[in-house]
Each structure stands twice: as C-alpha cells, then as structure tokens.
Image (cartoon, rainbow, N blue to C red):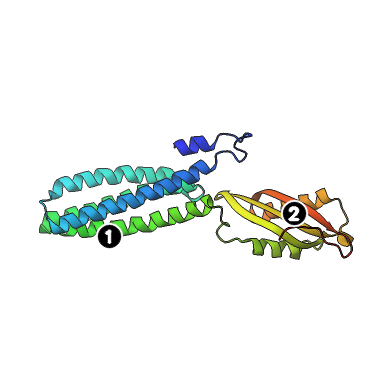
Amino acid sequence: LAAIIIARKPPCHHRTFGLYRAEVLAAFVNGLFLLAIVGIIIYEAILRLLYPVEILGLEMLLIACIGLLVNLTSILILRGSHKEDLNIKSIFYHMFADAISSVGIVFAAVVIMFTNWTFIDPFVSIGISAIILLWAWGVLKDSTRILLETSPKGLNIDMISDDLKKNFSEIRELHNVHLWSITPDMLVFSAHVQINESKIQEKQEEVISRINDYLFQKYNIIECTIQICLEHGSEVCNIDK
C-alpha cells in the first residue's frame, strides 16, 4: 500500500520519471519475503520430521479455517488488478500462498484427527513451500528484469528496428537503440534514426510524430526519444554504433 501511494507522486526535476518503480521495488521485496517464508517452512518441516511433536488436530483445523477465510477475502478484493500491477501481483501471490497453506493445513488436520498420522503435516508443508517457491521466483524474475532495465518480455530492439524499417520507407537505419521498462506497462524507447532524405516528403518533426504514434499504438511504448539524422548523398551522419 505504501508503494502504491509513493508511486503516485508526480515527476519533478530530481525524479524525471516519477517514483513509479517504487511498486516494482516493493514487488521485489515481497518476492524475497516469499523466499524467506519458504525457507522457514522447510526448516520447520524438517524439524518436525526429525523430532515429531503432538499435534492437536481440532485446534489446528479451526485456526486454518479462519486463516483461509481471511485470505480468500483478500484474494477476492485483489482479483483482476493483480494482472496489471507487479506489486499487487506479488501481494496477490502472497495471499494466495497463504490460502494454499491454509487448505493444506485443513487437509492435514482432518487426516490427523481421524488417523493420528502426525507425519503428514511436515510433508504437506514441504509441498506448499514448493508452490510458493514457484510464485516467488516468477515475481523476482519479473521485477529484476525491470530494475536492471532489460528489454521487456516478448520484445527486443531488433524486432522493433526491423518493424520500423519495414513500415517507414524513409528510414534507412537505426542506431543507439534502447528499450526498457519503468513498470510492466510503461515502456520507453530511444533511437538515432537515419533517414533517406530523397524519400522524405515532410518535416522531421512529422516523421518523429508518426514513429511515436506507431510505437504507442502497436507496442504501447509511452515514451519515445527519436533523434533524426539525414543522409546527404554518400555521406552518412556520424552516429556511434
């Protein structure tokens, strides 16, 4: 919740992109927290396997049912919004992991009540931790990709460069191409675009505007920085490759 509030602060001369990445950072921390939970669950499960203790099945069942009700309520509240926001996605997975844990505990409690097989509790815990580990890894992978400013999932600079050259006949080549994410739904693109002057029929600003519109419509790239470079005869603009 704090990350969502912080991320809404507008950009300023110190934070030109705002604080949108606060949500991504929060998702990364939540992913680490989920990993810590997995470690604790596995550690406790191993201890219970090595040193069995008496388990009160009825009390265990009641507590698990209360926890399941709380977590299901949280999941219903977050349902839908977790697909768009990485931070909420990590919270959703956290709540879902807790709900799965409660289901596993309910199952173990019922078995223990009728069979007194207390050994089933640590095995259920290990199974739950495996599920949580998969979710934690997904959240960490997605948030790390954004924090390290790698290309968004499913996109790369070669794909976009080839697409632009195919759809804009005046574009000869692209150099210094960069593509990264501020958040999962805020993509940024920059490039030096070499233009064949003989094919251009409009002002450079209009070419840039068309490129920006195209990238936004097709790839949802909200921020583009395009530097135009004209080709004069056999001379090509000096752009570092």
Q: List x then y, in percent, for residue 202.
A: 87, 53
Mark 2 and mark 1 lie on one chain; the one further toward the N terminus is 1
Q: Which residue is mark 2?
A: 211
**What distance separates the C-alpha of mark 2 from that of mark 1?**
50 Å
Q: Is residue 85 left or right of residue 48?
A: right
Q: Which residue is mark 1?
A: 127
Of residues 202 and 28, the one nearer the viewer is 28
Vertically, is 195 above or below 76? below
Count of marks, rendered view: 2
- Numbered disc 2: secondary structure: helix
Quarter holding residue 88: top left
Binning the other alpha carbons within 10 Å of mark 2 as few (below 14), some (14 to 19) or many (20 upward) gives some
Quarter holding residue 132: bottom left
Mark 1 belongs to which amino acid? Gly
Of residues 16 and 45, the one nearer the viewer is 16
Q: List x then y, in percent, for residue 179.
A: 63, 55
Vertically, is 183 above or below 173? above
Q: List x then y, in percent, for residue 89.
A: 45, 49
Residue at 56% x, 56% y is: 150
Q: Is residue 14 left or right of residue 88?
A: right
Specify the quadrant that holds the C terminus: bottom right
Of residues 36 and 169, the one nearer the viewer is 36
Mark 2 belongs to which amino acid? Ile
Specify the quadrant that holds the N terminus: top left
Vertically, is 187 above or below 167? above
- Numbered disc 1: secondary structure: helix
Residue at 45% x, 47% y is: 27
Residue 97 visible within the image: no
Q: List x then y, in percent, for residue 4.
A: 49, 38
Residue at 41% x, 57% y is: 137
Which circle marks residue 60 in the picture?
none
